[in-house]
């Protein structure tokens, strides 16, 4: 009698995780190969670290918008907090720590911690609001952070660290200005690398996807789907939403630190309302609640403006048209039906079929 072996089907969580990790690793290998062989332009090589930062931002925002079900359009505020905190930390460690990877890691951790504290302080009052009110308050938070960074001056000299909100500081001749108000961070050492960005992306995917598959993640989604039913079974809705909001803020701060340490100078205006909307566009186009979709959309929409630069004045028009077409293709019911039919046919091709005619009773003579 022949033995039959059956392969255990992978769970949806395992499939999504494998797809997400596979996309990131394949992208890293492809980008490394193209860069080493000269097939990648210098402008695209300069986009590699920002792409990683934007992927972290998109995946972290998806935890709030897609998993928790709250609309936040102030995510650039957490990115700003993490960026400038990370820059200051790496700058302060410059004379004490020789290793750039250690300083980069310290900056990323510091950016995540400070952004997480900001997330708790904002989340406690804000998450009591719902709908449009929550979106408006998070938008205000992003604008407040941007304006606050415009008036902060930080310098370092032999007497220590000086902080001011008006720029008039008595400094020694060896002083170094780290934050210069509207001019932002100046003289930043570029210590971010593509490898560190990929590692941070994988860490972000690991954290978010494990939260989604955990007891806390299921509770967060239960609160999103039906708040009254969740409260009726004893779930603390505020606690779970705050947890998702804080984790999202921490990851956004870490992504901001990676982003900030990739440029020699960084202006506070970089983290304005448009940046928050851009990150939200990544989430929407990739699919709300779809983690690997956020990875792809953040990559494509970051590269696309540079790829369309040859069209000069028309590149943003082409960019807008592409966004509209992607929205139609993603959310049109008819097209979604066709995509499902095509996916089923592809699966049928690769599906394993039994060999030989079936016999009655499952045995052969």
Image (cartoon, rainbow, N blue to C red):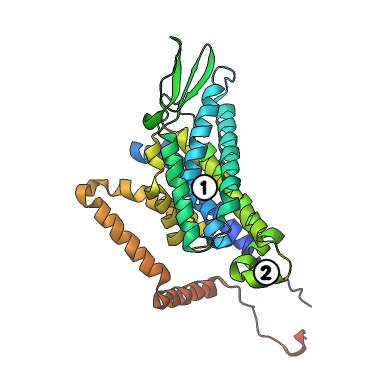
The quarter of the picture where residue 325 lies is: bottom left
Q: Nearer the viewer, residue 291 or 277?
A: 277
Write down the residue under mark 1.
56
Q: Residues within 10 Å of mark 1 (few under 14, many from 20)?
A: many
Which secondary structure, mark 2?
A: helix
Which secondary structure, mark 1?
A: helix
Q: Is residue 8 visible?
A: no
Quadrant where the image shows the N terminus: bottom right
Q: Is residue 190 visible?
A: yes
Tell me residue 153's x, y (percent).
44, 26
Tell me the tag on residue 230: 2
Q: Residue furthest bottom?
A: 360
* Mark in the foreground, 2 or 1: 2
Tell me residue 237's x, y (percent).
65, 62
Tell me residue 316's x, y (percent).
27, 52
Q: Are marks 2 and 1 in contact (CB under 8 Å)?
A: no
Quadrant where the image shows the C terminus: bottom right
- Residue 278 drawn above or below residue 227: above
Q: Is residue 9 left or right of residue 186?
A: right
- Residue 204 drawn above or below residue 67: above
* Count of residue discs: 2
Residue drawn at (64%, 53%) of the image: 243
Kindly report the distance in space between the C-alpha atoms of the residues bearing marks 2 and 1. 29 Å
Q: Is residue 287 left or right of residue 220?
A: left
Tell me residue 236's x, y (percent).
69, 61
Residue drawn at (54%, 22%) of the image: 92
For marks 2 and 1, the one nearer the N-term is 1
- Residue 8 drawn above or below residue 141: below
Q: Residues within 10 Å of mark 2 (few under 14, many from 20)?
A: some
């Amino acid at each position: 009698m022949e033995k039959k072996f059956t392969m255990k089907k992978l769970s949806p969580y395992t499939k999504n995780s494998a797809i997400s990790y596979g996309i990131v690793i394949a992208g890293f290998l492809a980008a490394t190969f193209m860069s080493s062989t000269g097939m990648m332009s210098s402008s695209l090589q300069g986009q590699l670290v920002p792409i990683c930062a934007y992927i972290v931002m998109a995946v972290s925002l998806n935890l709030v918008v897609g998993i928790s079900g709250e609309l936040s359009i102030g995510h650039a505020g957490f990115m700003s907090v993490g960026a400038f905190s990370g820059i200051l930390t790496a700058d302060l460690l410059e004379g004490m720590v020789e290793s750039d990877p250690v300083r980069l890691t310290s900056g990323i951790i510091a950016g995540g911690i400070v952004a997480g504290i900001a997330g708790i302080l904002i989340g406690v009052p804000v998450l009591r609001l719902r709908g449009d009110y929550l979106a408006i308050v998070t938008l205000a938070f992003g604008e407040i952070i941007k304006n606050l960074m415009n008036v902060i001056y930080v310098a370092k000299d032999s007497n220590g660290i000086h902080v001011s909100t008006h720029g008039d500081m008595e400094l020694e001749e060896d002083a170094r200005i780290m934050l210069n108000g509207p001019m932002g961070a100046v003289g930043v050492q570029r210590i971010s690398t593509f490898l560190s960005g990929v590692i941070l992306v994988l860490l972000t995917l690991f954290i978010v996807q494990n939260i989604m598959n955990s007891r806390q993640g299921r509770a967060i989604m239960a609160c999103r789907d039906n708040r009254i039913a969740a409260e009726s079974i004893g779930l603390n809705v505020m606690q779970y939403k705050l947890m998702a909001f804080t984790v999202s803020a921490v990851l956004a701060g870490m992504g901001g630190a990676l982003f900030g340490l990739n440029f020699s100078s960084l202006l506070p205006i970089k983290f304005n309302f448009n940046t928050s909307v851009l990150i939200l566009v990544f989430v929407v186009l990739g699919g709300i609640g779809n983690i690997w979709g956020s990875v792809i959309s953040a990559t494509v929409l970051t590269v696309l403006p540079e790829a369309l630069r040859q069209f000069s004045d028309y590149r943003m028009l082409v960019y807008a048209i592409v966004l509209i077409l992607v929205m139609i293709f993603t959310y049109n019911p008819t097209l979604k039906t066709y995509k499902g039919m095509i996916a089923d046919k592809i699966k049928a091709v690769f599906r394993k079929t039994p060999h030989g005619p079936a016999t009655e009773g499952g045995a052969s003579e």
